[in-house]
Image: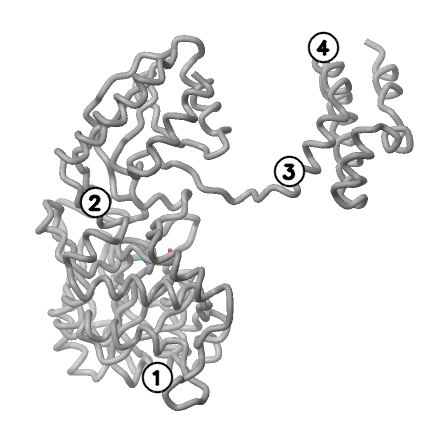
Amino acid sequence: MDKNIFYRSIPKVDILLEDERIQNAASIYERDTVMDAIREQTEYVRGLIRTCDEEETIRREIDNLIPDIIRRVEKMHTPDMRPVINATGTILHTNLGRAPISREHMARLAEVACGYSNLEYDLEAGRRGERYSHFEKLLCKITGAEAAMAVNNNASAVMLILSSMAKGGEVVVSRGELVEIGGKFRIPDVMEQSGARLVEVGTTNKTHYSDYADAVTEETKAFLKVHTSNYRIVGFTEYVGIDDLIPLGQEYDLPIIEDLGSGVLIDLSKYGLTYEPTVQDSIRKGADVVCFSGDKLLGGPQAGIIVGKKKYIDKMKKNQLTRALRIDKFTATALELVLQEYLSEENAVNKIPVLRMITKSAEEVEKSARRFKRMLERKGLKAAITLQKCESQIGGGSLPLERIPSMAVGIRPETMSVPELETAMRHLEVPIIPRTVNDTILMDVRTIEEDRMKLAADELKQIL
Ligand SMILES: *Cc1c(COP(=O)(O)O)cnc(C)c1O
């Protein structure tokens, strides 16, 4: 195959610019963007000629050069961040944006964020205010803590706490609690960044009270407990709970910090889940400072929430790092709204999407699944539609062993393979992300909101 013929058949830039379709694009969009698209696409085709040995593929790419250039220009002007339908059954899916925010809260958020707001303005006094003031009182009331604040996420909360309370000193932590969160984020590395030295005690499976006590030196600034969010050590194990550490803290006058990870504010065992220690528990037992994520089980925006003794929180508010880690008006607004729901547990469970999905009963899920199945059947899809029992999971590094009985609609396509259908679903305008089990596409209904089902059915009709 003479590749030079192919190289020569790529039109020169000035020729391309004379094409009517390109001129049309240049009149709608910026010429600059069109030029970039021409350069990128011709570069791509040249690369393909260099590496590909299938004449037909190369010819097709050359024939499609102009439509592909225009597609590139259009793509630049189409937002890439978009809503997707989560049919995986994983409620806190970190890749899919973790906790969804309720529509009601979003409407309020849009109102606040579109214009000016009192983010840092005290309307009573008519002077500068604090961005935490909008939700600090709520957090104190709900958790029983003296003071509260929030930063960008929980990883930064851990860093800020250690930097404010233990910089240049030592922090004692159990070897069984040196967590790696997703995305290669490791507690020991976060600690190092904070300027505190990590003193590991105990072993992976067992840490005793005496391990903590023996590790105390002149340099010790705090004890740190880390919730082993995304894994469990079972079997021959022993760990020291917050309540057991309190006397030790008192003896040496050292604060106890707890990174709770998920930040549960209600007793989930009432809803059939495994009991997960709540923030209130930690505060009641005497933890000096507790931090947790805003967008895990709390069900709010991405944030790292810090609650605890006022003297420590005040120190954090003054730390220079806080400026770098501070939350914006979106987070401050959304946090206040979600925390307000917690004033009544019933409200929280019904109105916060994450809690609503977690606590939805098996019967309710089955009803939704039957409804969704009927919708799909009415569309006359070229596929076998079934109902299948399945299990949802919490995800987001929370309650890793928990499996919630759920119901999925199974789809076995008749005109394409399962991987082809899965790819087509990902390329829909509102992409649908399912699970594939035993050569069937499973759409777990627990994570598909009722108001998205019609859209999902319409979209599936387009491809089946
Ligand atoms: C998830 C988690 C974090 C990190 O929280 P982000 O809000 O994702 O930064 C830190 N510590 C623990 C124990 C966690 O589970």
Q: Is residue 356 above or below residue 371?
A: below
**Which one is earlier in the sequence, the residue at label 4 or at label 2?**
4
**Alpha carbon of mark 2 to alpha carbon of mark 3: how far?**
36 Å
Residue 9 is tagged as none
Residue 314 is tagged as 1
| Depth check, front residue: 203 or 107 | 107
Instruction: Residue under label 4, please give it.
Output: 56
Q: Is residue 15 above or below residue 122?
A: above
Q: Which secondary structure, mark 1?
A: helix
Task: Give the residue displayed 44% in from the left and 63% down from the top.
Answer: 111
Amino acid at dot 2: Ile
Instruction: Residue under label 2, please give it.
Output: 358
**Is label 1's Cβ within 8 Å of ligand 1?**
no
Instruction: Residue under label 3, please give it.
Output: 75
Numbered label tally: 4
Residue 117 is situated, as x and y percent measured from the top left of the image, at: 46, 73
Question: Does residue 441 appear left or right of residue 420 in this picture?
Answer: left
**Is label 4's Cβ within 8 Å of ligand 1?**
no
Q: Tell me whether the residue at label 4 lies in contact with that at label 1, contact meaning CB atoms closer than 8 angstroms.
A: no
Q: Which secondary structure, mark 3?
A: helix
**Which one is earlier in the sequence, the residue at label 4 or at label 3?**
4
Amino acid at dot 4: Glu
